Amino acid sequence: MLPEGASDLIRVSAQAVLGSSWTQIFQAPFQSQVAVSIIHLANTSTGPLTVSLCAVPSGGSPAQGNALLYGFSIPANDFIELGDGLILLSGGYLTAQASFPAVISVFMSGFQF
């Protein structure tokens, strides 16, 4: 859902493969906002893994207080989708980490205005 009056839209997307430390996925550009359409997290391993995903305000750090998911288990060869309605303000960013590196892939897409 886009804010009323958002006329000049630019489609944005990003992808990343998560490590066991925080991995930045996307950052809203200076003096703009991003309405996130979808965040897709896929577990390509043969076992369940946990993931934490945070929407961090500009100048902030990832923490349980700004988490969209925190210690969430994704089953083997499965995925989760979320994010519709999330607005990243100027300088805000999405970051995530997994319990095991290189097997959780993330894709996000949205509109910059």
Image: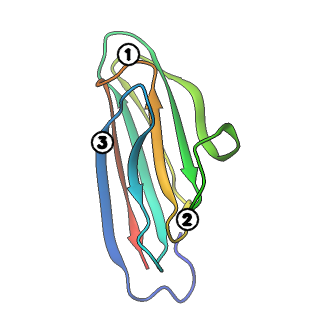
Residue drawn at x 32%, y 65% is 12
Q: In the rendered image, which quarter is residue 14 located in?
A: bottom left
Q: Which mark is residue 49?
A: none
Distance from Cα at disc 1 to Cα at disc 3: 18 Å
Q: Say whether residue 103 is visible.
A: yes
- Do the residues bearing badges 1 and 3 touch, measured as CB atoms within 8 Å? no
Identified by mark 3, the residue type is Ala
Name the secondary structure under disc 2: strand
Identified by mark 2, the residue type is Ile
Residue drawn at x 29%, y 22% is 44
- The correct choice, above or below, for 112 with respect to 20 in the image is below
- Do the residues bearing badges 1 and 2 touch, measured as CB atoms within 8 Å? no
Of labels 3 and 2, earlier in sequence is 3
Name the secondary structure under disc 3: strand
Distance from Cα at disc 1 to Cα at disc 2: 30 Å
Q: Say whether residue 81 is visible.
A: no
- The correct choice, above or below, for 75 with respect to 83 in the image is above
Distance from Cα at disc 3 to Cα at disc 2: 20 Å
Residue marked by disc 2: 87
Name the secondary structure under disc 1: loop
Residue found farthest to the right: 65
Identified by mark 1, the residue type is Ala
Q: In the rendered image, which quarter is residue 13 located in?
A: bottom left
Of labels 1 and 3, earlier in sequence is 3
Residue marked by disc 3: 16
Image quadrant holding the C terminus, namely bottom left
Q: Which mark is residue 76?
A: 1
Residue drawn at x 48%, y 67% is 35
